[in-house]
Image (spheres, grey):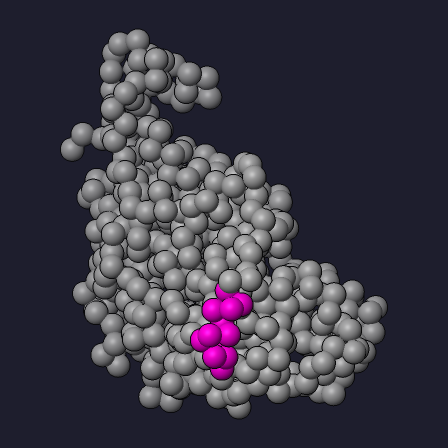
Amino acid sequence: MKLRSQEWYGKNDKDGFCHRSWMKNQGYPHDVFTGRPVIGICNTFSELNPCNAHFRELAEWVKRGVWEAGGFPLEFPVMSLGESQLRPTAMLFRNLASMDVEESIRGNPIDGVVLLMGCDKTTPSLLMGASSCDLPTIGLSGGPMLKGIHHGQELGSGTSLLRMADELAAGRLPVCEFLDAEGAMNRSKGHCMTMGTASSMASMVEALGMSLPENAAIPAVDARRNTLAQMTGRRIVDMVREDLRMSKILTRAAFEKAIFNNAAIGGSSNAVIHLLALAKRVGVPLSLDDWDRLGSSLPCLVNLLPSGEHLMEDFYYAGGVPVVLRELAEAGVLNRNALTANGRTVWDNVAKAECWNRDVIRPFSHPFKAHAGIAVLRGNIAPNGCVIKPSAASEHLLRHRGRAVVFENVEQLHAQVVDENLEIDESCVMVLKNCGPRGYPGMAEVGNMPLPPKLLRRGIKDMVRISDARMSGTAYGTVLLHVSPEAAAGGPLALVQTGDTINLDVSARKVCLEVDDRVLEQRRAMWTPPPMPARGWTKLYVDHVLQAHEGADLDFLVGGSGSAVPRESH
Ligand code: FES
């Protein structure tokens, strides 16, 4: 088998000299260029992305494995998206980072790729970019942080912050206590250790078959994370020799497996958007309705925050994703024959997985929550759909009719929600506009709007909220998200006014604005679109971004271009 890298290194002419000679300035001996598979280690290390800040060390363990297996590892950086630091939202840059990944892989002498992923958007951006090249590729997640502990209480990243912020706003938590918890919540390297988006996406990598087993849950500081990195390095060299490309693993069965798994782990609603975008890159038909049809009737087995009470460390000690996949396979849900990155089927990998803590991972026959997968709702307010995560919602609000209280944008929300004179009570439906892909821009995680402090003080913990935004995977509540089309694109959400009545029925998959069509037409005639960015990345983004129900990729990035680059550089 002729290696792709030999198109660079296998020639004894000016070009071959050029490609090898400049690399030799790093001290590589000549024989690394004469037939070893070149393994690109796509590294999202950044000190501005604390969840991935340990990746230089992780990459060294991958390199050990690559060298051992006869490969030639070459690490390269790509744009790293730190969820806790980037403004206006890391999601604005997911597609940009995917372009960086795609072009970095295609343009270089690489035969196979290891993707180092961690913080929320680093996982989908790397999967999307790499899949548009379709080389042999394997994922390695950085692992979750250890659980937070503060004054004897366990703290989960994100989820506990939201709870404490509510307590602070209600006047029940002194500000000194609140600030003291800062250093206790996120106390080790790794990504958020709740079943938020990072952990959900790491689980998705494993469920898709794109990593070695146990990838999702081994804590970042556990020595077995380094062992997994070394084994991943060994494995990618063999994947090159077997020509096991992403497209052979990312089949329809793999995507279905990921949807089943996301329901069973109580995974993030953000996984919906990322999986839809990835499917479009590899040409697998997958729709928003597949999420509801395949996943919504499945139970949640995993008792982790934000749907439950434990954290990722507990999930690993209990057996992690292999146990969940075994439960799903034995219940007849999974296709047992789907291929995975180690060359074995999913059933080969999980058939002997044992659960060591049934409070953390419940059996399929006695689940933690019934009917827990993502539900997709439609109605005149969301003709192309919106989603809700019932496992993180309040049972009593899943059927609800209430008066809309509308916020035109996030600034208005923040200014008005703290106003003691705002006309709102717990029966109202909070509506937030202009936070979708084009409107924010970037579809920020603001859909779990803060509740008014005057209601928090009365002990109100949840209200129905609707928006075209996303919410953090660590968040919770009866929150309808991803309304499509979004308000800024002229969707009906733009026409809702305070005082309208909204009728929600999750079991009927309906959400309706009870306003006469003629009135809505009059409002549409008065509607003007919000101003859009005039230059730079944000202009390119808003001009080309698809709506949420299509994965919010850029229209010209859908599909792939393979790995061929016919022209030399000089
Ligand atoms: Fe990086 Fe949560 S902020 S995973």
Q: Quadrant of the N terminus?
A: top left
19 over 396 or under it: above or below:
above
Residue 56 in view, yes or no: no
**Residue 159, percent across and down?**
61, 71
Residue under the image location 36 percent in, 54 percent down = 277
Nearer-the-camera pick, 34 or 2? 2
Q: Quadrant of the C terminus?
A: top left
Residue 153 counted in the magenta span: no
Residue under the image location 44 percent in, 62 percent down = 485
Residue under the image location 49 percent in, 47 percent down = 542
130 over 155 or under it: above or below:
above
> What is the quadrant of residue 16 in the picture?
top left
Name the dominant secondary structure of the magenta segment: helix
Nearer-the-camera pick, 405 or 196? 405
Nearer-the-camera pick, 310 or 386? 386
- Boundaries of the magenta span: 513-524
186 over 89 or under it: above or below:
below
